[in-house]
Each structure stands twice: as C-alpha cells, then as structure tokens.
Image (cartoon, rainbow, N blue to C red):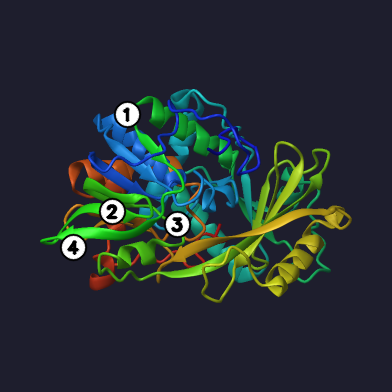
Amino acid sequence: MLDTTPGTAPGAALPDHPDFLWRNPDPKKVYDVVIVGGGGHGIATAYYLASRYGITNVAVLEKGWLAGGNMARNTTIIRSNYLWDESSGIYEHSLKMWEGLEEDLGYPLLFSQRGVLNLAHSLQDVRDSKRRVNANVLNGVDAEWVDADGVKELCPIVNISPDVRYPVLGATYQPRAGIAKHDYVAWGYARAASALGVDLIQNCEVTGLDVRGGRVVGVQTNRGTIAAGKVALAAAGHSSVVAGFAGIRLPLQSHPLQALVSELLEPVHPTVVMSNAVHVYVSQAHKGELVMGAGVDSYNGFGQRGAFHIIERQMSAAIELFPVFARAHLLRTWGGIVDVTPDASPIVSLTDVSGLYLNCGWGTGGFKATPGVGDTFAATIANDAPHPLVAAFTLDRFRTGALVDEHGAAAVAH
C-alpha cells in the first residue's frame, strides 16, 4: 500500500489501512457508481455523491496512486475571474465552496486567499482586461483594475520598468483568489469519502468498458471486471482514451504542461502573478518554494514532460518581471497532461451511452474547479441530468455551435 500522508513521496510503504483504502475489487459486487480517475475531481465527485445524495456504494478506480496524476502536478492557483457567464458561474461556485472547504472536510487545506494579479503588457491587453473586470463585476465576482503603480503596491518585487520586453501597463486583481495545497485537498476529500463508505481502489487500470444494449454495465480492469449501474469518467489527460472504450470520440487533444519549483526561500512574494503575454505564473508556496509554470506545449502527447525550449523561454521572461529571482536555484521540474477542447472550456455531460458520464477537457483550469465540479458532476450523475451550472458544457455544444470560447479571455490559461 502507498503512503497516504500529505507531502510524503509517492510509493513509500505503510501498513495497510483497510478503513481508508479498499484494495481488492470484489467481482461479486455491483456498484451504483464507478468513477474512473482517482484525482481531485474523481474523489470530490465520490464525496458529494455520498454526502449530498446518500449514494455511498461507489468505487473510485485509479491506475496509479490516488491523486498521483495531474492533481499532484497542478498550479495550486484558485480564482474565478473568467470572462464568460458560463465559466464565471462554475468557477465562482467553486471559489465559494473553497472558502468553507476546510470546515466541511475537517482537514487543513492551507487555502490562502492572497489575491491574483493578471498582468497586461499592451494596449490591447489593457482593453481586454478592463472588459473582463466589467464582466466579472456584473456577475458578482470581485475584480478590479489596477495600474502599474498599483501592481507594484500589491507586489513590490514586480519589475514595472518600461525598458523590458513585456512592460507592465497594469493588471486585473481578484482579492479573493489564492492558492491551496493540492495534495492536502486530495487527501481531505479521500478521507472524508472513505469515512462515508466510498471504496478507493489504487493500482487499478481501466482497460475497457462493458456496454450492452446501449448501456454501460461495468468496467474492465487489470484486476478483473467490476460491475456498475453507472460509470463516470474523470481521468484527466486520458479521457479520450477511456471514452474510446465505449466507442465515443471526444473533441479533445492532450498536451504536456510544465511547471517547476525553486529551493526554499524566505517569504518575498505576497500574491500570485500571472501573465498571458509571457504565459507564466509565479506564486510562493507555504514552505517557501517558488511555484512557476509555463503555457501548454503545442504538440500532442501523453508524456508527463515537456519541451525544454518552452519553459526556458518563458522562465527567462519571468526573470525580467522578477529580477530578484534570477539567482534562485531550481529544485525540481515536472510535467502534467491536460485535455484541451476546441473552445478551451470543459465537458461535463451525459453521453449517448446510457449510464456513462463525462468530466474532462478542463485544460489548465481543473484544480481551481475541484469542489465546484465535484458538486455539480455528482448532481449530474445522481439526477441523470446536467446541473444548471454545467448545462452549457455538454457535448451537444459541439453539434450546435454554442461554444463557450475562453481562448485568451481569462488573461492566462491557468
């Protein structure tokens, strides 16, 4: 069994905890719901199925260790300042849930509402940013525009000199935004779901879906077949592969996404700074390391790594914004895999296969949506109908053309 202690290196041995992780699939058991994907979205969905709808006969299947995929490789950034009404709705719902999540789960998540700055570097950036601020305010989302001096006041270490490649002309600012400890979030949900009777099964790779008469009846795994009344897919980065087992072709592309952390430093970075032109974000974690990341690599792939020139170019631009970090040492770098849709918005949907549900295509927005999509996806599964907050994100929009195009609209992809 794997260590379930937050912050411990994956793979460390611990004694078995049968009250927490159920390890051996029972071929005689029929689950009400089987969730494919033991990351933040999958575990959160299981928790809300149990806590809100009393559906506790649930299994979460994870091919590796729980929360060892994108959940362990994300940006840790939480915000809701998206442009379009549909996006703003689900992300603001999620942010409100974040604000009470520690109490709900009874677990420390290190949720820090330190604010997020989205920088503008050109006149068009300024126009687009002010438009987004106005849209946010109309949707009840806290947002404001600050000029370059305002950026410097909120984050003194940002270089606002005009003599750089990407001069800072101002920024949008969301005070309620911030960061949380991603592995703590995963284990908080996992412990709470397990306490309600949910079975969390590690090292269980799904190799097929059993579909009979147009209805899903179970999943095939490397540890045997598991029967199910409903199956929900929440396998970030590999959703198109798993959906393909049921003959469903999804409008998704998988791309690498890179990030890195520095050595531990004294607290010097008070907020989160993001830039669309540079396509980089910088925050400082609770222990002191800088968390920095780049944009999505342009090529398709399932490898948890990325092209060196991508992150090198974006980190060099980041150093112009933060000269104080020029001598910081790299501690480690990694890559995740993100599913990207044509309109850069997620898919939360029923499918043409009865009993099969999709939650995918979040791109780089998945972590911040964790509680909100866990809640709304659970409602969609329990009621066999889209929750109102995700009704715009069904597969039908790719047939009708009613896209929710967030490409470039939210200042940066993360």
Query: In which quarter of the view is residue 28 placed?
Result: top left
Badge 3 element: loop
Type of the residue with mark 1: Ser
Q: Residue beneath label 2, please? A: 219
Q: Nearer the viewer, mark 2 or mark 3?
A: 2
Q: Earlier in the sequence, mark 1 or mark 3?
A: 1
- In this view, the residue in front, 385 or 49, is 49
Q: Earlier in the sequence, mark 2 or mark 1?
A: 1
Badge 4 element: loop
User: Compared to 143, does 194 lie above or below?
Assistant: above
* Residue 352: assigned label: 4
- In this view, the residue in front, 340 or 274, is 340
Instruction: Give the alpha-carbon distance from disc 2 to disc 1, as whole Å.
Output: 24 Å
- In this view, the residue in front, 412 or 101, is 101
Residue 316 seen in the figure? yes
Q: Residue beneath label 3, please? A: 236
Q: Position of residue 398 (x, y in %)?
A: 28, 70
Instruction: Give the alpha-carbon distance from disc 4 to disc 3, as whole Å.
Output: 21 Å
Residue at the extreme left: 213
Q: Earlier in the sequence, mark 2 or mark 4?
A: 2
Q: Residue at x 83, y 42 (%)?
A: 265
Q: Position of residue 243 (x, y in %)?
A: 31, 63
